[in-house]
Image (spheres, helix red, strand yellow):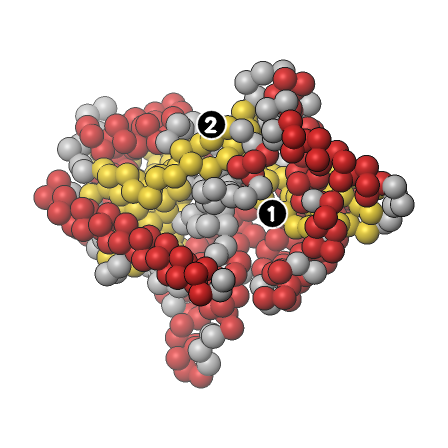
């Protein structure tokens, strides 16, 4: 289940009366937390956990850090994160949510060295409270923005300051949706090792990706098997026989917004519309998505690829990213045209556009393991894991319990899903 579907379920059961008021105001009372230290060179480090409503005053520094970051994470940059807060705060992080920032002060110069949104969360079964990076199934990238100038020192300082008893935080840090091959992940693991902290990987899986490791023509030959490519071309020719077919790619903010409106209408006609979880029916989530598309399109970091049939959209994919690193954020297709595979057709066209871009480096599908379509189209794989770190050497047992609890919940989910599928036969 994606975060949109989860949010919609929760919002439909929102408590009313005085209980509802207390629930909706809970995040507003989240305090700002701060811890500091000074190293041997007299550099001062400050860890600040700023409540979500203080995001505005941090946006410029976060944007600047993103330009120096070891790895890119478009979901943690101000354009996207400011669209979510305060609009979705109480739904995404009802217990407590902070913008975690790590600062280094040298003389009169103060710079942000690390940033990530975090929340208090009860993870696993039975529940264990953890401090968790705010990633989820809908935006499954939890890579922090980390300054490449002092990456190792920043990671070690982060783990030391998070263990400050004055902060009264959980003794376990849950770094969800980490890309195992990223440099940031390597710095985090090494920092935990240097400090003698137990760091355990859990929930590891592979998801489809596309790497630019050969020329476009050769790479396209690895996208789908030859037999499947021939079948897709046959389906497209069949569709073109009595219809006017166009593939459109937005180039301006106005075109992206027009394409987005077509997208939410198209999604409404799909199974999400029938289930009642389409964007079209939920104002806050639609506004959140529309703001992301508009803002990123104005920065030339959002493209909407659309397959048009006789002037109507039958397939669409929203692509986000910059500096050659892209993610297909959302996709929808018209099930009335399923015989012609409109979803795969538009994704193949978007893939071709990526490979023909001279600046393209890689794309992360964000897909679940064994995704029925992306695993067939994109041949490469990224290994994704959750890194559970004990913030105190004496609390290794608690970290182990957290890992076991999370794995137990994952196993339970798989069993429930298997039973549901069995009963639906």
Residue 6 image point, x, y percent: 48, 62
Report crowding for label 1: few under 14, some 14 to 19, many 20 or more residues within 10 A (C-alpha): some
Helix, strand or loop at label 1? It is strand
Q: Position of residue 317 (x, y in %)?
A: 66, 43
* Whether residue 247 is situated above or below residue 23 in the rendered picture: above
Q: Earlier in the sequence, mark 2 or mark 1?
A: 2
Q: CA distance from mark 2 to mark 1?
A: 28 Å
User: In the figure, is residue 93 to the left or right of 333?
Assistant: left
**Rendered view: 411 above or below 356:** below
Number of the label disc, if any, that sits on residue 68 = 2
* Farthest left residue in view: 394
Q: Residue at x 47, y 75 (%)?
A: 13
Quadrant in the picture for residue 146: top left
- Please tell me whether mark 2 sits on a helix, a strand or a loop: helix
Most foreground residue, 155 or 334: 334
- Residue, far bottom: 17
Task: Please name the residue that numbered disc 1 is placed on.
Answer: 330
In this view, the residue in front, 270 or 87, is: 270
């Amino acid at each position: 289940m994606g975060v949109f579907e989860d949010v919609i379920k929760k919002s439909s059961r929102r408590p009313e009366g005085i209980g509802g008021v207390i629930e909706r105001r809970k995040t507003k009372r989240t305090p700002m937390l701060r811890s500091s230290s000074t190293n041997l060179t007299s550099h001062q480090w400050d860890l600040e956990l700023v409540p979500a409503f203080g995001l505005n005053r941090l946006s410029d520094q976060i944007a600047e850090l993103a330009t120096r970051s070891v790895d890119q994470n478009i979901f943690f940059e101000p354009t996207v994160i400011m669209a979510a807060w305060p609009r979705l705060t109480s739904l995404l992080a009802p217990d407590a949510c902070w913008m975690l920032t790590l600062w280094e002060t040298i003389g009169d110069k103060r710079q942000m060295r690390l940033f990530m949104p975090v929340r208090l969360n009860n993870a696993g079964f039975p529940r264990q409270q953890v401090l968790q990076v705010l990633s989820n199934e809908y935006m499954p990238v939890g890579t922090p923005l980390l300054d490449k100038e002092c990456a190792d020192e920043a990671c070690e300082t982060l783990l030391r300051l998070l263990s400050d008893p004055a902060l009264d935080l959980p003794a376990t840090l849950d770094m969800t949706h980490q890309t195992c091959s990223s440099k940031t992940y390597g710095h985090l693991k090494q920092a935990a090792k240097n400090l003698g902290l137990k760091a355990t990987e859990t929930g590891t899986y592979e998801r489809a990706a596309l790497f630019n490791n050969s020329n476009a023509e050769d790479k396209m030959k690895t996208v789908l098997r030859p037999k499947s490519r021939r079948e897709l071309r046959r389906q497209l020719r069949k569709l073109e026989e009595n219809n006017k077919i166009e593939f459109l790619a937005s180039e301006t903010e106005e075109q992206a917004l027009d394409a987005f409106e077509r997208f939410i209408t198209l999604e409404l006609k799909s199974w999400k519309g029938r289930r009642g979880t389409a964007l079209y029916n939920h104002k806050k989530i639609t506004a959140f998505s529309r703001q992301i598309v508009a803002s990123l399109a104005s920065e030339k970091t959002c493209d909407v690829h659309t397959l048009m049939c006789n002037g109507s959209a039958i397939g669409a994919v929203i692509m986000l990213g910059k500096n050659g690193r892209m993610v297909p954020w959302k996709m929808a297709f018209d099930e009335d045209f399923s015989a012609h595979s409109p979803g795969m057709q538009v994704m193949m066209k978007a893939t071709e556009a990526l490979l023909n871009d001279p600046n393209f480096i890689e794309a992360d599908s964000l897909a679940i393991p064994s995704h029925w379509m992306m695993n067939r189209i994109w041949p490469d794989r990224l290994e994704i894991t959750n890194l559970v770190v004990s913030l105190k050497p004496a609390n290794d047992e608690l970290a182990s319990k957290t890992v076991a609890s999370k794995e137990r919940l994952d196993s339970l989910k798989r069993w429930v899903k298997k039973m549901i599928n069995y009963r639906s036969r």
